[in-house]
Image (spheres, rainbow, N blue to C red):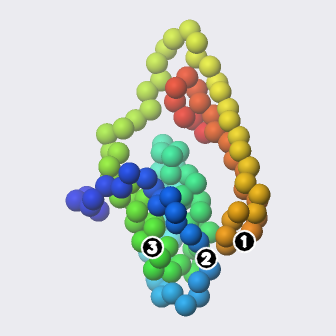
């Protein structure tokens, strides 16, 4: 993965998800290891949180499609190795939060999703 072509986003914008049983199953131990590593990286790379948590739902029976999608996250990370959060000291160090919800657009389980994010100054913290 060191010499891979970097991706601009962790997920393809029009990617659909299904529990397609006809697709080829893969070795779940490799898939779980990759997801575990990405879950560890979420602490410092919050921009991959949604993608990683979405693919973590398929650990019990991953398909070839899921493995390719998880590899895309690693390719995304390969393009951003020199980026980091930098907290500057200044007087207006504000904490700002945003939230959103999506009702039943989940194509796999038809459950609602909600989430939020917080910025400390200009840096994304949660």
The secondary structure type at the circle numbered 1 is: loop
Q: Report the residue marked by disc 1.
A: 109
Give the total of numbered labels: 3
Q: Residues within 10 Å of mark 1 (few under 14, many from 20)?
A: few
The image quadrant of residue 59 is bottom right
Residue sitting at x 64%, y 39%: 117
Q: How far from the left and from the top, in percent, is residue 60?
A: 60, 78
Q: Earlier in the sequence, mark 3 or mark 2?
A: 2
Q: CA distance from mark 1 to mark 2?
A: 9 Å
Q: Pick out the residue farthest to the top.
A: 91
The secondary structure type at the circle numbered 2 is: loop
Give the numbered dot on residue 18: 2
Residue sitting at x 43%, y 27%: 86
Q: Earlier in the sequence, mark 1 or mark 2?
A: 2
Closer-to-camera residue (18/24): 18
Q: Pick out the residue farthest to the bottom.
A: 22
Instruction: Kindly report which numbered mark, 3 or 2, lies closer to the viewer in this rendering.
Output: 2
Q: Report the residue marked by disc 3.
A: 67
Q: How far from the left and from the top, in percent, is residue 63?
A: 50, 80
* Quarter of the picture holding the C terminus: top right
The image quadrant of residue 1 is bottom left
Residue sitting at x 65%, y 27%: 96
């Amino acid at each position: 993965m060191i010499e891979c072509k970097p991706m601009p986003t962790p997920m393809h914008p029009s990617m659909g998800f299904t529990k397609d049983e006809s697709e080829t199953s893969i070795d779940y131990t490799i898939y779980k290891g990759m997801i575990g590593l990405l879950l560890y990286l979420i602490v410092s790379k919050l921009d991959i949180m949604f993608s990683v948590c979405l693919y973590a739902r398929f650990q019990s029976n991953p398909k070839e499609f899921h493995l390719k999608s998880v590899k895309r996250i690693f390719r995304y990370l390969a393009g951003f190795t020199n980026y980091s959060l930098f907290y500057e000291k200044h007087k207006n160090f504000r904490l700002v939060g945003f939230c959103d919800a999506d009702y039943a657009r989940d194509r796999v389980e038809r459950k609602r999703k909600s989430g939020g994010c917080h910025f400390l100054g200009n840096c994304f913290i949660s």
